[in-house]
Image (cartoon, helix red, strand yellow):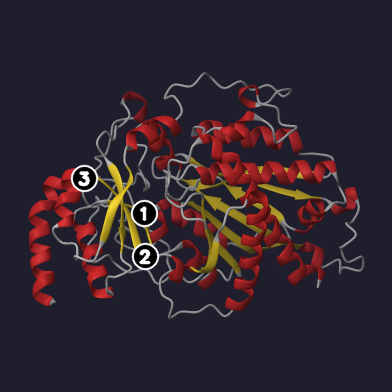
């Protein structure tokens, strides 16, 4: 086995420089370059059901050394994007029992179908009709049926703040920090004043006044991986749905939750990568930070958080999964971690983040810590599992989609440095989850616009269930 691994490394190193798919150089300003094309590239699924663990590791090492683009990785299969020449090189090192077949045969056609035009009409900012002429008074707005640029995401969220802030509902924007390229990492907070609208019937009428000074925060983060566009779209849909429901029924269940929690969304903590994926490279995953190699850029944000982080064994700075040279090297993860760990609100009120949900795609999973190893079991595993099972049941009632829930290390093949490991293991956010939204691989990261709304609807139902679960466990009880 040692000899086989040594031969594998030597062979792959001789091929890697010629066969790298994803060595993306630091680019000129994205507004002046054409979008990358993916003609001839396909997505392959490798099934490891009949392959032992040591041989699986050899295959993963081969994929790393060839810098192939891994779309999804579990203990039993890997989805990988590659050109036919690159996959032919990989096949030389696959065990004979590995089942590999084409999963997506024409990548460029999916890119064309799911990517908006590069040059959109200018934004329209009108208080009556909203951004781009889309109304804000209904979830039927076409905004939720398309993917949007970073500027449009931010503009829509700002318009929601204008539309809903006041008369007892508070919506405010804030800055988490700045990205490597100097963009603002923006978030929006929503809450409701129980004194103006009256208390919900499930709320404790004899609540201690001092307890009312505790702000319980429910944080939804998305966009760590730039190409996972359905995450930011879902985060905006969720907060829009919550605000509309609370406004329409000030004593209803959504209003009770909005009076009990501050709901915070950060649509993308990776604005540089998100912009780059829209304007230059649809399959871009990382941030755009300069790293050790001047010819490559970017750190995989979801492998850079400071809990059980370790240096990579085989990935290079050009790899899509490059975790950085040290924990929190990425300025975006550092900024978000500082926000989550800071309990001060700038007033006498104490702020406590009670829930953290990290939205990703794809795989249809709802997972709790830990991701880095199943030998590390969270103290709250039983409660986290109970809540997770309720979430996926609520999701299924909307459109019939089946999700799985469980510990992240069981359901995916994840690297150390995961966001939910940090939030649970360091900042003590008890209800920490990572969600992989639609689908299971038919479209992968290129979910058609027609499926954005269904994905957002079912995710909203699941997250509302989770908020009610936490409310009953920690407030009403």
* Disc 2: CA contacts within 10 A as few (<14), some (14-19) or many (>=20): some
From where the camera sits, is residue 345 visible?
no
In front here: 294 or 402?
402
How many marks overall?
3
Where does label 3 land, which residue? 294
Where does label 1 land, which residue? 300
Where does label 2 land, which residue? 415
The residues tagged by marks 1 and 3 sit, at their Cα atoms, a distance apart of: 17 Å
Q: Position of residue 413 (x, y in %)?
A: 38, 65
Q: Nearer the viewer, mark 2 or mark 1?
A: 2
Q: Taking 104 as reference, is 313 above or below it?
A: below
* Res 345 → quadrant: bottom right
The residues tagged by marks 2 and 1 sit, at their Cα atoms, a distance apart of: 10 Å
Is the Cβ of the residue at disc 2 closer than 8 Å to that at disc 1?
A: yes
In the rendered view of the protein, which quadrant contains the C terminus? bottom right
Reading the chain from its start, which is encountered first: label 2 or label 3?
3
* Disc 3: CA contacts within 10 A as few (<14), some (14-19) or many (>=20): few
Q: Taking 204 as reference, is 110 above or below it?
A: above
Secondary structure under the numbered disc 3 in the rendered image: loop
In the rendered view of the protein, which quadrant contains the N terminus? bottom left
The residues tagged by marks 2 and 3 sit, at their Cα atoms, a distance apart of: 24 Å
Secondary structure under the numbered disc 1 in the rendered image: loop
Disc sitting over residue 56 in the figure:
none
- As drawn, which residue projects farthest toward the top? 121
């Amino acid at each position: 086995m040692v000899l086989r691994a040594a031969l594998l490394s030597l062979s792959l190193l001789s091929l890697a420089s010629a066969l790298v798919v994803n060595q993306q150089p630091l680019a000129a300003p994205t507004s002046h370059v054409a979008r990358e094309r993916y003609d001839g590239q396909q997505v392959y699924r490798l099934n490891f059901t009949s392959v032992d663990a040591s041989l699986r590791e050899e295959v993963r090492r081969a994929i790393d050394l060839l810098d192939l683009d891994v779309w999804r990785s579990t203990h039993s299969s890997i989805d990988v994007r590659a050109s036919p020449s690159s996959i032919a090189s990989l096949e030389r090192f696959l065990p004979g029992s590995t089942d590999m077949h084409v999963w997506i045969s024409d990548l460029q056609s999916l890119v064309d179908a799911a990517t908006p035009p590069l040059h959109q009409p200018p934004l329209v900012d009108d208080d009556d009709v909203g951004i781009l002429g889309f109304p804000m008074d209904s979830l039927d707005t076409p905004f939720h049926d398309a993917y949007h640029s970073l500027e449009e995401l931010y503009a829509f969220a700002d318009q929601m703040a204008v539309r809903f802030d006041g008369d007892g509902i508070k919506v405010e924007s804030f800055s988490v920090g700045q990205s490597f390229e100097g963009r603002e990492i923006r978030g929006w907070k929503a809450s409701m004043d129980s004194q103006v609208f009256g208390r919900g019937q499930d709320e404790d009428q004899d609540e201690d006044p001092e307890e009312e000074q505790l702000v319980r925060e429910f944080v939804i983060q998305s966009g760590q991986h730039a190409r996972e566009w359905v995450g930011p779209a879902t985060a905006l849909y969720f907060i829009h749905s919550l605000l509309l429901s609370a406004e329409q029924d000030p004593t209803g269940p959504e209003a009770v939750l909005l009076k009990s929690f501050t709901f915070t969304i950060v649509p993308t903590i990776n604005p540089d990568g998100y912009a780059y994926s829209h304007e230059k490279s649809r399959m871009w995953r990382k941030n755009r930070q300069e790293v050790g190699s001047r010819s490559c850029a970017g750190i995989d944000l979801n492998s850079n958080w400071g809990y059980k982080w370790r240096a990579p064994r085989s990935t290079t700075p050009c790899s899509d999964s490059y975790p950085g040279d040290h924990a929190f090297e990425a300025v975006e993860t550092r900024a978000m971690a500082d926000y989550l760990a800071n309990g001060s609100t700038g007033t006498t009120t104490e702020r406590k983040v009670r829930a953290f949900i990290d939205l990703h795609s794809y795989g249809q999973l709802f997972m709790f810590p830990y991701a880095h190893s199943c030998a590390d079991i969270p103290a709250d595993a039983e409660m986290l599992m109970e809540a997770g099972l309720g979430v996926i049941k609520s999701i299924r009632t909307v459109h019939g989609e089946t999700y799985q829930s469980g510990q992240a290390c069981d359901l995916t093949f994840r690297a150390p440095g995961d966001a939910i490991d940090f939030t649970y293991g360091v900042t003590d956010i008890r209800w920490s989850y990572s969600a992989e939204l639609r689908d299971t691989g038919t479209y992968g990261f290129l979910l058609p616009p027609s499926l954005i709304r269904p994905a957002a609807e079912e995710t909203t139902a699941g997250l509302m269930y989770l908020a009610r679960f936490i409310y009953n466990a920690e407030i009403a009880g």
